[in-house]
Amino acid sequence: MKNVARKKTPLLIVDDDKAVRRLLARIAERAGFEVDTAKDGMQALEMLQRQQYEIAIVDLMMPRLSGYELVQKISTLNPRPIVIVATALMNGDVASLDDSMVRRVIKKPFDINAVASALIEIAREAAEKRTNTPQELPTIMVAKDVEVRANEVILPTADEAGGEEKEKDELPKPDKIE
């Protein structure tokens, strides 16, 4: 299998809610990412100084060092990870973030398919920039008989009785900061 030989994309998940960290880590690991987690901005900053991450998913409301402050500190890193903000805050609260730093905003509560799609899309874009060649898209098994690929979900058809035919549904694009 090709995916075994490929180097996994390093991803850092930063959220003070343990359940959210575990959910995001599970989604990312199934997508083939090398995942580390941090419980707050201070721990994340320490990890970012020790290791280079391709992508960072950052919660905005955290103790010690908020996501807002962490995003500002990430902006000084070279190279710096692509930042995805995970938040339950409204658009006005997110508007104060530097648009050049935040690639995508994912809203809590999460749509698992939207999170998976955003991670796959951003990882593919980053890989294409590195190599200037298209990359094979990873597939995530979200639930039994449900797969997520780039921007589509493959579900069993309603009348399917153990057959192999699948139905494709387009996923909505996750919100972007414009």
Image (tube, rainbow, N blue to C red):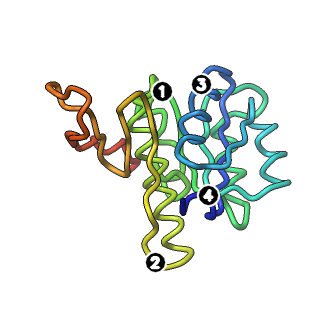
For marks 1 and 2 on the same chain, the one whose residue lies earlier in the sequence: 1
Q: Secondary structure at mark 1?
A: loop
Mark 3 or 1: in front is 3
For marks 1 and 4 on the same chain, the one whose residue lies earlier in the sequence: 4
Which residue is located at x 47 percent, y 61 percent? 124
Q: Secondary structure at mark 3?
A: helix
Q: CA distance from mark 2 to mark 3?
A: 33 Å
Q: CA distance from mark 2 to mark 4?
A: 19 Å
Q: Secondary structure at mark 4?
A: helix
User: Residue 101's image quarter?
Assistant: bottom right
For marks 2 and 3 on the same chain, the one whose residue lies earlier in the sequence: 3
Q: CA distance from mark 3 to mark 4?
A: 27 Å
Disc 1 marks which residue?
89
Which kind of residue does numbered mark 4 sit on? Val
Q: Eyeballing the image, is 52 above or below 177? A: below
Tell whether 2 sits left or right of 79.
Answer: left
The mark found on residue 134 in the picture is none
For marks 3 and 1 on the same chain, the one whose residue lies earlier in the sequence: 3
Mark 3 or 4: in front is 4
